[in-house]
């Protein structure tokens, strides 16, 4: 490392040396070559770059210099530029601080003198054309003057080199001559050459002084002009981004009103295809950003089927209509049978349905800088980092899992389907619907405590009830079981893995979801896609879902392949688009699904398929002839004032509502979560810390028991072998997966009011 020669340089000295500069969250501090000259601090990657590439410059006249610790210090000019620097030692840091303070004092003095002299341009604001012309003429004149001064400097430099070499030769000859007449002649020659060298040096010094004076006289004006250009660029970038968002919003509104409903009946739009971008935020490439993703060619396109198929589907006695159940009559019959079913909850009016709450206290407007917390989380697993409730929403992760049941009607309809392929369409739509509640939900749910549970008993309202339990803490894993009177069972076990990449946060749900139907014995399984939270540091937070899902029926071999296209400001396609194809065990396509995960999904029957023309990159696309699309799922509107209530859906507003008889481990009884919902965030943070510390104490106690178990196997358990209260870890023989399965006993314990098995976690 290059060390400065003087620990306390004078104000006019150029100060150079190596420092470590903070670059980004991935690379951390990087070694850079810094040069302090004329009140400007510049840096380069290497010394060799000094002649051609400056990586950044900060003007010390308007900068603040702050010392953080023994080796670190910060230089900032009010927000536009900030350098976080680190020296190799405390002595080296002090040398730099001294040099910077001296340079800043001189720069401030020079700026004051420049202010006193005033500007050459008139004070009255000229028109834009006059201002641009005046600035251009001034810059051209100054550049010509500086160019002539540089030529003078080059000439003086050549003369100094020439006369200096001649003087050096004369001095060398002087040492080797004898005393006499030759001595006098040589001395005269040396004197002449010394005089020439002195004259040339003085000219060089004067030329340098003129150049420096001219440059300094214009430096303030140039700095102001540069700052104006920077401000204009920032405003233009913000305007461009706003225009892009407005354009995208208008395009979405237009496409939602025209293109999407007619996508299967308008051949003019069919050749555009549907973008099915393959994306996964878990990609290890740090330069992968979803909003800049390139669009892959569509795997298939759809065109209207031959009219003869429509005539067939319109007949009430048609076998096709009976099989698919897609025409209006069949849908109405489904709704009629659902309403007239004696087991249906709508027909049971023996007791009134409970009126549940429709509002919660408005979210307080507490500001907290997210980066102040996240900068200490780089490279860490976020589930292990304590976060203040300011970034949370007043629901736990168990309650967020229960929100998957908001559109349970899709599974009710699937349970009544005679065709397994049609049933697959409803299951796929249910899979997509579970993401609709996340589009505006940027708040982080509370991490459940080990052993925490949440019940959602909607047996009288909707015909189902569900139970969630946190079965592992590190890694965090939750088990969920729901069963319905309509003949379906949903179970899932989700473990969350997260990666913080500075600009965005990727959340990868690991584990499996399974749905079983009693009547047909069909057994479905699928996994979740990656959730990405963008603009973690700067800008407004927004959420995207991207990746692919394969919904598999293990009994029949049917499969639905869903593609969640990454969001892009500049995509020509519908935002947040989802496309899918339902195929049988032989790979033959029967249904096409299309829509968005935040609004609605449609499906239509494929009547004929063929290989179409090659798309980009030589990929051949399949052409499907389909019947008219039918809406299979549509998102429920948000409650009034949802933007002030964490963008909760109608179901989410009821999840934390107190209920009688729930287990003592239920999330509704969690005190920090309830305090946050009531707007008492300071108390919620204190209570959250208490609960987390209590959980650490319990874990340490289990670790001590594990040590005992090492010598006495009959005593104690390993801390990682925590035994869940209501779930057993089993191997599923159908799907071949291992997951926690509900073992029973919870609802019986609730009826008896016996919760002896529940630990004291709150």
Image (spheres, rainbow, N blue to C red):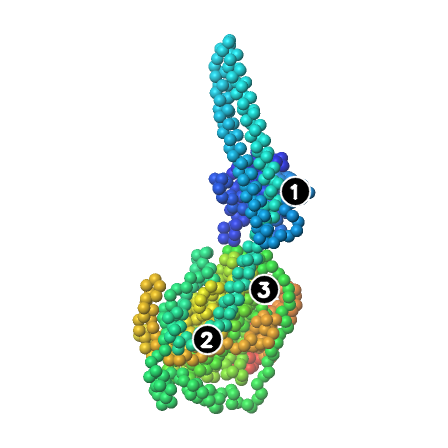
**Relative depth, front residue between 692 and 624:** 624
- Please identify, in this view, whether the residue under mark 2 or under mark 3 is nearer the observer: 2
**Nearest to N terminus: mark 1 or mark 3:** 1
Q: Residues within 10 Å of mark 1 (few under 14, many from 20)?
A: some
- Residue of label 1: 114
Residue at image point 45% right, 89% down: 337
Residue 372 figure quarter: bottom right
Q: Is residue 356 above or below residue 175?
A: below
Task: Measuring from the top left, give residue 562's x and y in whole percent.
Answer: 41, 71
Q: Is residue 312 above or below residue 116?
A: below
Task: Measuring from the top left, give residue 508's x and y in whole percent.
Answer: 47, 64
Q: Which residue, as the protein is rendered here, is positioned at the far right?
A: 116
- Residue of label 2: 258
Residue at image point 59% right, 46% down: 222
**Relative depth, front residue between 405 and 731:** 405
Q: Which residue, as the protein is rendered here, is positioned at the far top?
A: 180
- Horizontal side of residue 203 vs 289, given as left or right: right
């Amino acid at each position: 490392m290059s060390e400065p020669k003087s620990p306390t340089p004078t104000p006019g000295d150029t100060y150079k040396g190596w420092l470590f500069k903070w670059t980004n969250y991935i690379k951390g501090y990087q070694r850079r070559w810094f040069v302090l000259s004329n009140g400007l601090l510049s840096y380069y990657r290497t010394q060799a770059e000094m002649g051609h590439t400056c990586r950044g410059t900060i003007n010390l006249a308007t900068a603040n210099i702050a010392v953080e610790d023994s080796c670190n210090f910060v230089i900032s000019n009010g927000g536009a530029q900030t350098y976080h620097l680190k020296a190799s030692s405390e002595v080296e840091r002090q040398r730099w601080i001294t040099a910077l303070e001296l340079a800043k004092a001189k720069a401030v003095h020079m700026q004051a003198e420049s202010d006193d002299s005033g500007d050459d341009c008139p004070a009255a604001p000229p028109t834009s054309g006059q201002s641009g012309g005046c600035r251009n003429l001034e810059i051209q004149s100054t550049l010509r003057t500086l160019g002539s001064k540089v030529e003078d400097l080059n000439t003086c430099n050549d003369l100094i080199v020439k006369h200096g070499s001649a003087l050096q030769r004369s001095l060398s000859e002087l040492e080797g001559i004898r005393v006499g007449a030759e001595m006098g002649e040589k001395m005269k020659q040396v004197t002449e050459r010394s005089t020439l060298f002195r004259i040339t040096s003085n000219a060089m010094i004067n030329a340098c002084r003129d150049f420096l004076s001219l440059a300094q006289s214009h430096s303030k004006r140039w700095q102001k002009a540069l700052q104006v250009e920077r401000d204009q660029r920032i405003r233009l970038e913000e305007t461009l981004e706003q225009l892009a968002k407005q354009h995208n919003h208008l395009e979405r509104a237009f496409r939602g009103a025209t293109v999407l409903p007619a996508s299967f009946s308008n051949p003019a739009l069919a050749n555009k295809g549907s973008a099915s971008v393959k994306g996964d935020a878990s990609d290890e490439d740090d330069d992968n950003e979803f909003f800049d993703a390139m669009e892959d060619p569509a795997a298939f396109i759809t065109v209207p089927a031959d009219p003869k198929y429509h005539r067939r589907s319109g007949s009430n006695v048609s076998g096709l209509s009976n099989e698919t159940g897609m025409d209006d009559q069949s849908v109405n019959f489904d709704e009629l049978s659902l309403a007239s079913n004696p087991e249906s909850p709508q027909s049971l009016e023996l007791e009134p349905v409970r009126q549940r709450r429709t509002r919660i206290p408005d979210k307080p407007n507490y500001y907290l800088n997210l980066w102040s917390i996240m900068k200490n989380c780089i490279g860490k697993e976020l589930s292990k980092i304590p976060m203040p409730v300011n970034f949370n929403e007043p629901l736990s992760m168990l309650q967020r899992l229960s929100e998957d049941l908001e559109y349970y009607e899709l599974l009710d309809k699937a349970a009544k389907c005679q065709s397994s392929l049609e049933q697959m369409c409803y299951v796929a739509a249910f899979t997509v619907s579970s993401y609709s509640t996340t589009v505006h939900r940027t708040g982080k749910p509370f991490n459940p405590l080990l052993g925490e549970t949440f019940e959602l008993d909607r047996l009288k309202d909707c015909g189902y009830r569900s139970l969630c339990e946190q079965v592992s803490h590190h890694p965090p894993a939750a088990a969920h079981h729901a069963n319905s009177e309509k003949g379906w069972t949903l179970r899932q076990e989700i473990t969350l893995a997260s990666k913080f990449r500075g600009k965005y946060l990727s959340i990868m749900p690991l584990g499996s979801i399974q749905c079983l139907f009693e009547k047909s014995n069909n057994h479905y399984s699928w996994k979740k896609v990656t959730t990405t939270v963008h603009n973690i540091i700067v800008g407004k937070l927004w959420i995207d879902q991207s990746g692919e899902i394969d919904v598999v029926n293990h009994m029949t071999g049917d499969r639905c392949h869903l593609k969640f296209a990454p969001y892009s400001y500049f995509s020509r396609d519908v935002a947040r688009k989802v496309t899918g194809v339902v195929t049988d065990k032989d790979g033959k396509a029967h249904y096409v699904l299309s829509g968005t995960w935040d609004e609605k999904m449609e499906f239509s029957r494929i009547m004929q398929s063929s290989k179409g023309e090659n798309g980009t990159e030589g990929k051949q696309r399949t052409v499907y002839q389909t019947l008219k699309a039918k809406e299979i799922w549509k998102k429920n509107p948000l409650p009034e004032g949802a933007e002030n209530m964490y963008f909760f859906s109608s179901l989410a507003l009821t999840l934390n509502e107190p209920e009688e008889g729930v287990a003592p481990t239920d999330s509704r009884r969690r005190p920090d979560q309830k305090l946050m919902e009531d707007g008492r965030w300071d108390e919620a943070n204190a209570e959250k810390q208490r609960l987390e510390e209590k959980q650490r104490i319990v874990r340490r106690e289990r670790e001590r028991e594990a040590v005992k178990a090492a010598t006495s196997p009959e005593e104690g358990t390993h801390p990682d072998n925590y035994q869940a209260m209501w779930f057993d870890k089993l191997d599923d023989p159908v799907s071949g997966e291992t997951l926690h399965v509900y073992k029973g006993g919870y609802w019986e314990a609730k009826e008896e009011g016996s919760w002896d098995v529940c630990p004291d976690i709150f």
